[in-house]
Image (cartoon, coloured by chain):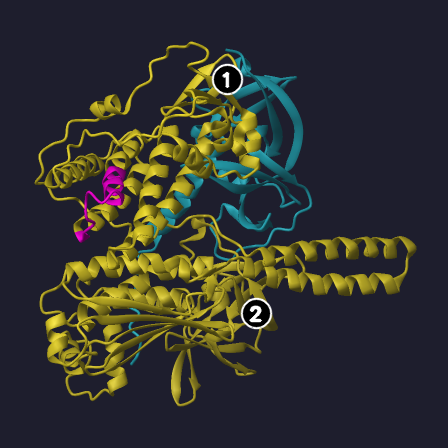
Chain colours: A yellow, B cyan
Amino acid sequence: MIDFTEFKDKYIQDAALLLDSLESDLLMLGKNLADKSLADNIYRYLHTLKGSGGMYGFDKIVEITHQLEHIYKLIQEQEIVLNQAIIQLSISTGDHIRNLLSDTDLVQKTNIENQKNIISRIAEILEEHQISPDSAHHTNSTTPDTNSSLFEVHFFPDENISKRNLNLINVMRDIFMLSECNISLQQNEKGEYWCIKFLKPCTREQVEDALFFIVDDCEIIDIQASGNSKEITTKQEELHAIAEMPKAGESLIINTHEAASKSNRLQVDISRLNTLSFLVSELVTSKSALFTGIHERNMEIISQSAERIDKISRQFHANVLTLRLVPLKDLTLKFKRLIHDLSIKLNKKVDFITQGEETELDKGIIDEISLPIMHIIRNCIDHGLDTPEMRQLQGKTETGIIKLFAYKSGNFVFIQISDDGKGIDTRKILSKAIEKGLIAPDSKPTEKEIFNMIFLPGLSTAEELSEISGRGIGMDIVKRKIQDLRGEIYVDSEKDLGSIFTIKLQQNISIIDTMLIQCGNSKFAIPVEDIENFEVGHRIDFWVNASATFQYKNEILPVVNLKKFLNIEESDNLKTKLIIVNKYSKRFGLVVDRIIGEHQAVVKPLRKSFRHLSYYTGASTLGDGTLAFLLDVNKIGQLSEVKQT
Amino acid sequence: MKQIETYLSFISGSERFAVNVMQVLEVLQKQAVTTLPNAPDTIVGVINFRGDIVPVYDFRKVFNFQNRTEDKKHAILIFAIENDDETTHVAAATDAVKDVLEISSELIKPLPQFGYHFNPEFIKGIYMADGLSYLILDVNKVFNIVEMNTVNKYMESNDLNTETNNTPLI
């Protein structure tokens, strides 16, 4: 018994990719309405979605793509002229289909609404052009081959289909290009199968060609020949079966897929996989050599193999990390879509330029950085760019520019988002900051300091709080998110020229350079970037409540006794080691038993059940198999502060 | 409907338990457990299991056994726990792992009303054979409840406002 849910899951993923292509082409088509090949693409995507949707019971998807592809067919036949309204409707339909993929039985109210609305909008458009919605697609008037007949194919998929990584959507596409089909899931004594009824007469060769990749798993039955007068539902009947179309007038509930849709799949460069295979074979060879050496008690061979294995391990490590790298390009569709939607909503003309999209980041980081970047783009369009009229008055081009520039430098990746708008208004920011009590009224901050104030929570200088960027909660959360990824964000701006946001990120988050320390019998790791200095040999007296201070560079710093903090048993260790840590510009001292040395930590996360131990950010395996725990010094500082009060 | 299922038995404190073999992923005999400072009482430490950091619970502390024997070298059982469509790995330290038993479902009797000093929700029933009684453990329930309790206990005892404002010094 084949598990059809596995096929269905794969279909949903493949359909999502198809919808991405659909959206991308629609955005391009929107900028160039006359492009025939793009319009053809759209028709093909819709056609494929329709056919394959039927296979997995997505009747609503079938219904709606059927309607929309009709319009594109008419565009191809030049009975309808493509316009922005149709493009916008198509984009919304794409969104709706995405929602339908997760709501097969159409339970969600918004989906039911949208289904009705989109269908009625399509009917409107057809009415405008005086085309009745019931007119079937023209069946090709080519006289059928004398060899042609009506076929029915019974497709019995077996486990090998998924093993062969066959993309069923593409297979179905070939079938649908040949003829319209009726697909249903059926069962007979041989098991479950898909019954594909061809509605157009074809020759057996044509059918076998279309079924090329799956022909071994199919039974091809000639209906007319076998004299089976099965009922073949015509296009007309299908259309009548579609639900009544309500009158127009309701606005579409547009759900953009803003929520970062994180998939668990990755596309990997073949060359990286080849390197991996090569390393595996090298490892196997070295391992054999090692065992030979052991068997023959030959120290030279043993140490040589050990060295070789060490080298290979390093290369493995580096290679596996590269497998997780994903180019920024994967996010650009989302950004393009956001800019498209915002420019309509805010009445601004925007061009989106990208440079360095091939720059790669760890998949984990890419997933998390998407929202912050979108928020920055939003900010730029909302607050930075002016309306086309204003821009003209200033002598600028009507269309504003948002530029995304990414590049790699050392172990870091820089992402710059810039606009050519009016720049950050320092006077406004300063007065708002003073008004909200975020800085003292008589302070004289530098321009740079004022720019950085936009990252303070609660700051918003929008005259009317635009529903897009909201109440200035945005930028400080953006900064926080970036810092959580161990990155940084800078901003620069010039009046009337524009602003530039620069995000600096590490290429991968899972490897951190740390300093290994010991307290009692437990080992801990502190990220090197959080450590400012070490002081050894001082005597630090802790007060009764375990607090202490230490003088460091003209500052009195608080000191935390890590053992006390973690409730580890004290031993009398007079020679304390003090680490001066510095995170988010807060400095304090940390007292430990022993500073062991540098350690490149491969960080593994701790369970959710340890979430309340917020000062642990993960664990790293040491050479001897034990674990060292990564510490979040900022959290330690925060918690120690509270303990004292 | 009579179902015969395979169970693994082990000893913790003075009680004998049995757990459905389908829920046991692995048995580790000589595994070093790293202590996690400040972890709740019920947790002995953590281990690195197949690339994942897995907490190791002490069954004796989970069931609150009064007579605690010396800390010997534990045998560690790795369980696969279902929690809202997610399968996570959890480990528990036991005193000794015993035999594999074939138990028919109709031979599992319900727990008596009282006489046990731990949460009866954890126990599916009792099985008796050869003069020994085995408590059939519902591992999913045990760890889901335990994890909830640990978090709740922490939340109660500490009213720390951990979300302090991170305004950077300009």
Question: Any magenta on residue A70?
Answer: yes
Left or right of residue A3: residue A199? left
Q: Secondary structure at mark 2?
A: strand
Q: Which mark is residue B78?
A: none
Q: Which residue is mark 1?
A: A191
Q: Which mark is residue A517?
A: 2
Residue type, mark 2 in image: Ile
> What percent of the width, then of the height, locates residue A200?
37, 25
Separation of disc 2 and disc 1 at Cα? 63 Å
> What percent of the width, then of the height, locates residue A269?
55, 57
Q: Find residue A477 and report its image quarter.
A: bottom left
Q: Secondary structure at mark 1?
A: strand
In the image, residue A275 sits, relative to residue A476, either above or below, namely above
Q: Provide the residue span drawn in magenta.
A: A68-84
Left or right of residue B4: residue A118? left
Which of marks 1 and 2 precedes in the sequence? 1
> What percent of the width, then of the height, locates residue A522?
57, 62
Q: Residues within 10 Å of mark 1 (few under 14, many from 20)?
A: few
Residue type, mark 1 in image: Gly
Residue at point 62%, 57% (across, down): A626
> What percent of the width, then of the height, locates residue A597?
61, 73
Q: Find residue A582 and report its image quarter.
A: bottom left
Residue at point 42%, 37% (across, down): A173
